[in-house]
Amino acid sequence: AYEICACLVGSEMCIRNRTKTKRKMSIPALKKIYQEKVVPELKKTLGIDNPHMVPNLEKIVVSSGIRSEMPKEWVQEVVKEIAKITGQQPVVTKASKSIANFKLREGQPNGVKVTLRGANMWDFLYKFIAVVLPSIRDFRGIPTRLDGAGNYNYGIADHTIFPEVTVDPGRKNIGMDITIVTTATDDNSGRELLKLLGMPFRKPTTTANTKK
């Protein structure tokens, strides 16, 4: 009996180890593109020999502000929707001090945010580039300006552009900010990284001089 139990336990351990191995071997599609295509191109474009110095994604922060007059139920609604969009449970941020002009009390919820890393980060960005942005009506690309340190911020006024959200005429739209943090040391390197990953930056328009 003890031998049978030991065999069963051993088999279960083998199955678990195989499952973990498969999960480890699974590489997000966009990360695979980064490793196989983006890194060689960045090394050539930026003149980098050391592969560890090539700009990479560090994290993505998705956040949404909460106005002081909103009810407590709204905070939970925002948490639920952002969790649905990102696949990760967000945290509720609270005011560190009271601000009378904004009717904000210390400890009152003032926002919801989630920080994505690893596979969740790569999968979210892939969805954002391939599905979310193209679904925006009359979409003509996103602004090319970064924050001066190689990171990119993009604001969304309506969260229903995400495929996970059910469109409901009675639902209030949730605005959010998406911050893509890279390891780039300047905007040109960060912009080149995001461009090679497929970020649809707006093409500069040139206007002809019609004055004579």
Image: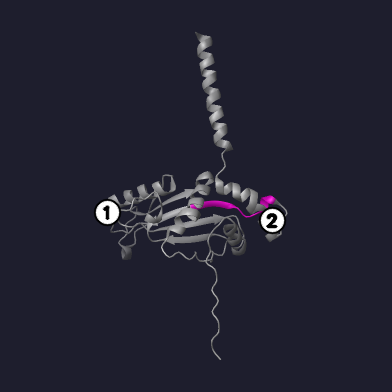
Q: Residue 211: within the magenta?
A: no
Instruction: List the single residue furthest toward the top.
Output: 1
Task: Assign a secondary structure to mark 2.
Answer: helix
Tag nearer the camera, 1 or 2 = 2
Residue 43: mark: 2
Label 1: few (<14), some (14–19) or many (≥20) C-alpha neighbours in 10 Å: few
Q: Is residue 27 visible?
A: yes
Q: Residue at x 57, y 55 (%)?
A: 197
Residue type, label 1: Pro
Type of the residue with mark 2: Lys
Q: Nearer the viewer, residue 135 or 120?
A: 135
Query: In the visual, does 95 lie left or right of 121?
Result: left
Q: Judge the density around disc 2: few (<14), some (14-19), many (≥20) Cα neighbours within 10 Å.
A: some
Please say if 176 is above or below 119: below
The x, y position of residue 19, in whole percent, is 53, 30
Mark 1–mark 2 Cα distance, whole angstroms, equals 51 Å
Residue hosting label 1: 71
Place of residue 186 in the rendered image (x, y in percent of width and height, measured from the top left): 61, 62
Is residue 91 visible to the viewer in this orientation of the structure? no
Mark sitting earlier along the chain (1/2): 2
Label 1 residue SS = loop
- Residue interval drawn in magenta: 51-60
